[in-house]
Amino acid sequence: MPVKVISPGLATSVQDLGRPGYYHLGIPISGGMDRLALRSANLLVGNAEGAAALETVFLGPELEFTEDAIVAVAGAELPPLVDGEPRETWASFKVKAGQRLSFNYLEAGARAYIAVSGGIDVPPALGSRSTYALGALGGLEGRNLQVGDVVALGESGNSVREGRSVPGHLRRLPGTPAELRAIPGLYWHRITEESKASFFDDTWKVASEADRIGYRFQKGRSLNFNERTQPFGAGSDPSNIVDSCYPYGSIQVPGGTEPIVLHRDAVSGGGYFMVGTVISADMDLIGQLQPNMDTKFVEVDLETALAARRERRNHLERIRESVKE
Amino acid sequence: METRFSFGGDDHIFGEVDEEMSLEAFFKSLSVTKALRESQIDGVTEICPANASYQIKYDPDRIKPDDLMAELRKVEEDAASAESVIQTRIIEIPVFYNDPWTRETLMRFRERHQDPSGTDIEYAARINGYDSVDSFIKAHSESPWFVTMVGFVAGLPFMFQMVERSRQIEVPKYLRPRTDTPKLTVGYGGCFSCIYSVRGAGGYQMFGITPMPIYDPKQEISYLKEFMVFFNPGDIVKFQPVDREAYDKGVEDVDTGKFEPLIRDFKFSLDEFRSGIDAYNAKIGEAIHAS
């Protein structure tokens, strides 16, 4: 039975764990920007971890339920209200038929995941229910939610109950400043030693151009390039390369001025050089950054990145344990 | 041409075949990625060929980065000795050059352009030494193109013209990207032509528009029912200039489900191509219209 969208919030979309396998055709993986939060919200309502949920940013939606459901909100501290009554984040609660779920003002983080027992039921596209708005693919008609939309829910198992929660120490949000660990590489050799140092020394601020495609940062020193004759086909600016693929998490710096970290709805390639890549364990954190937040890029090597990846997996395992009955 | 490898974080390997663009670099990228696809290495989740480079995404929980790198070097070695012959297809794309829609758009963003006094195609013709827009259109449409990369956004082809470097058209991108580009605009940046698969931001110079959709997430268009993306790297494209009337007819035929793209199977040999470019391109032209 469906959920009615009374107000859609700023940008609310259906997301699951994404559609790998089509990046070579320019179709990005998409899915929740903060996957740990998405999985947590699903676990709390008894869904499969990869079930489709709603990702909402900064300003939550208002939703009217037409049947009883168990709901959980994880990720950003975006306090849920049921008919105006406060509920906990990172915890499952009941919403009865006819009741409205809305949200108070954002307290921390940027993106909250609203999981509903049974999951959001939109038709899968290329194996995923995730919304890729730029390509009008997946989700609800390939776009963010709008007023008047009716969102279908899947069948929920009968073991679902309210009152589960993820303990505080297992909830993950960026610190101050936010630290994003990155492995230098790709076209790192293009910049001077001085710029290599300043890139990691400087404190950057999240710019207003920050969305599912990528996050832009500013206020650090501009990067200087080692001189070269530009290769044929690359373009005349020293930050240009012959258009190549862009890894998820790759850090491009057009014109050497403002780094952009590509995220789940990444453009799959283009003609700007990249200084390196944010490690997989820290990708979730980017989805929780607000404009103007101080951010440091922290240089790590591959071994450290793999250890961080294992730590993140153990972290998820602890969340799984914590929500078991 | 020795590929330069770099780890992209802990779950990508990036291989730059060459710093500069060439058909040779593209062919190596294409053959290595094809061989990688066939070798079905466990843990590899994405294999993306690009113009003169490629990228692999993998799950480091399933395959160690160093092990994958070793596999990759082995595949590279084998692919280097491979014959440069590919079984592909030639596609004719109708283009309405100098159309009113891209013209209206380029006028709106004139202050972001190198030459605010003219149009994109006039600028491109002039800086590439053509005496008229017509002779420029002739150069753009006379010789075929390789689709050397599909991406940026869903289904967008980057195309590299199959001519000697001295005849390659080169143009800069807009000084600042536009926030709007009509869907199906035929654009140009660096040494690449492209077709914008969806409406949106863009920095390439705009030369014209095609009536032929190349991406359809709803999969309703007759020739996109099986898969929503039309192009693959390795496709050969020949642009066919059309006038307003033929463009309108094309749009109408797409809408009524009658439009059938002109597609021919073709076996391309890089060696034969190199031994006589114009003669080989003439053969491609004939192959399209052979019944």
Image (cartoon, coloured by chain):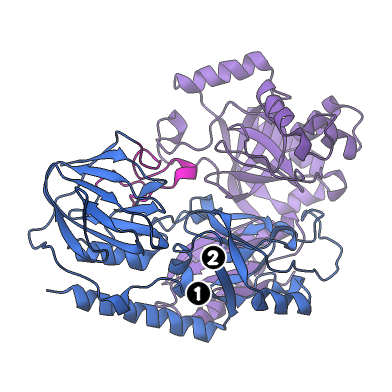
Chain colours: A blue, B purple
Label 1: few (<14), some or many (≥20) within 10 Å? few
Q: Where is residue A48 in the image (x, y as percent from the top left)?
A: 22, 62
Q: Marks 2/1: CA distance? A: 8 Å
* Stretch of the chain drawn in magenta: A121-146
Is residue A304 found left or right of A88 in the rendered image?
Answer: right
What is the quadrant of the N terminus of chain A in the image? top left
What is the quadrant of the C terminus of chain A in the image? bottom left
List the residue tagged with mark 2: A293
Is residue B250 found left or right of A56 in the rendered image?
Answer: right
Q: Residue type at mark 1: give it.
A: Thr
Is residue A316 highlighted in magenta?
no
Is residue B270 found left or right of B152 in the rendered image?
Answer: right
Q: On what subunit does the disc labeled 1 rest?
A: A
- For numbered disc 1, what is the local secondary structure? loop
- The part of the image, by quadrant, that contains residue B94 is top right
Q: Are marks 2 and 1 in contact (CB under 8 Å)?
A: yes
As displayed, is residue B111 above or below residue A210? Answer: above
- Residue drawn at (60%, 32%) of the image: B184
Q: Position of residue A238 (x, y in %)?
A: 80, 61
List the residue tagged with mark 1: A176
Q: On what subunit does the disc labeled 2 rest?
A: A
Q: Residue type at mark 2: give it.
A: Met
Q: A266 or B77, which is in the foreground? A: A266
Looking at the image, how many numbered discs can be counted on the residues?
A: 2
